[in-house]
Image (cartoon, rainbow, N blue to C red):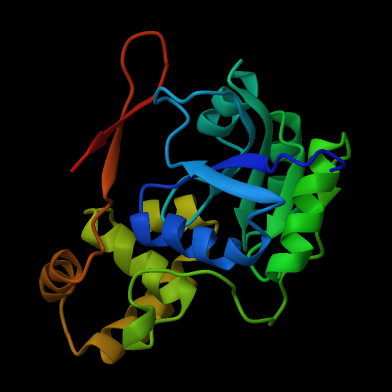
Amino acid sequence: MTSSEPLHIAVVNEYGVVVRGMRAMLHRYERRVAVVELDVDSDTPRPIDIAVYDTFAQDQGDTGEVGRLARSARVGKVVVHTWNFHPDLVQASLERGVHGYLAKTMPAAALVDALERIHGGETVVSPPPGNSQVCGEWPGREEGLTPREAEVLALITQGLPNTVIAAQTQLSINSVKSYIRTGYRKIGVTSRSQAVLWGVRHGFEPDRRRHRPAGGATAYAAR
């Protein structure tokens, strides 16, 4: 960007720790980008330049929620921030109107550069994450949970069965079961009910819940 005003972005995710992690990661670049809100449906002084849809414990970029963001008059561009890079998923996201498909392994400097390029009119698809370290924050990081283990545990805490978790995360059912086993070992539980109770006590419930009223618009409610 050539303007002296920072790029205004909204991080769209139901977990406050994820949003705060993005804000902290971009803090050094606050003259270039500013995380201005958590929710593009709330009243703000100005439109959002880019809505960054973070897929942690949410639907992926090929869903109606992303399409709704892309159609919003209050949002300039939409970016999907994810570790799911299946070619069909990337293509479906772009067909929904997404202008950026960015890996969660991108360091802050590269992420800021990509956001500015997207705001300037480019469509940016980053290289797949591979085995690089995931940036940002997620629930359970302090307990040693990997991002995938944390995501699966968050969805278990939300009450979703393994088949739905597999579909939502684009993982095989065997991968979901593997993340459950390793996650359970790390948090010291042996059953699903214990995992749910642990998750509730350790911030694995969403901070906000989406409600879809008639007409398809999405609103967010604080817990």
Residue 120 percent location from the top left of the image: 86, 37
Q: Residue at x 53, y 69 (%)?
A: 136
Is residue 216 rendered to the left or right of residue 200? right
Is residue 96 rendered to the left or right of residue 45? right
Residue 151 percent location from the top left of the image: 40, 65
Q: Is residue 31 above or below residue 157?
A: above
**Quadrant (top left/top right/bottom left/bottom right) for the C terminus:** top left
Q: Is residue 25 above or below residue 187?
A: above
Residue 209 percent location from the top left of the image: 27, 39
Q: Please, which residue is most extreme toward the front here?
A: 4
Q: Nearer the viewer, residue 121 or 101?
A: 121
**Quadrant (top left/top right/bottom left/bottom right) for the N terminus:** top right
Classify residue 133 by image quadrant: bottom right
Is residue 82 rendered to the left or right of residue 5? left
Q: Residue at x 63, y 55 (%)?
A: 30
Q: Nearer the viewer, residue 143 or 117?
A: 117
Q: Residue at x 28, y 56 (%)?
A: 161
Q: Looking at the image, how many numbered discs can be counted on the residues?
A: 0
Is residue 28 rendered to the left or right of residue 201? right
Q: Nearer the viewer, residue 220 or 167?
A: 220
Q: Residue at x 51, y 31 (%)?
A: 65
Q: Nearer the viewer, residue 29 or 23?
A: 29
Residue 172 percent location from the top left of the image: 52, 65
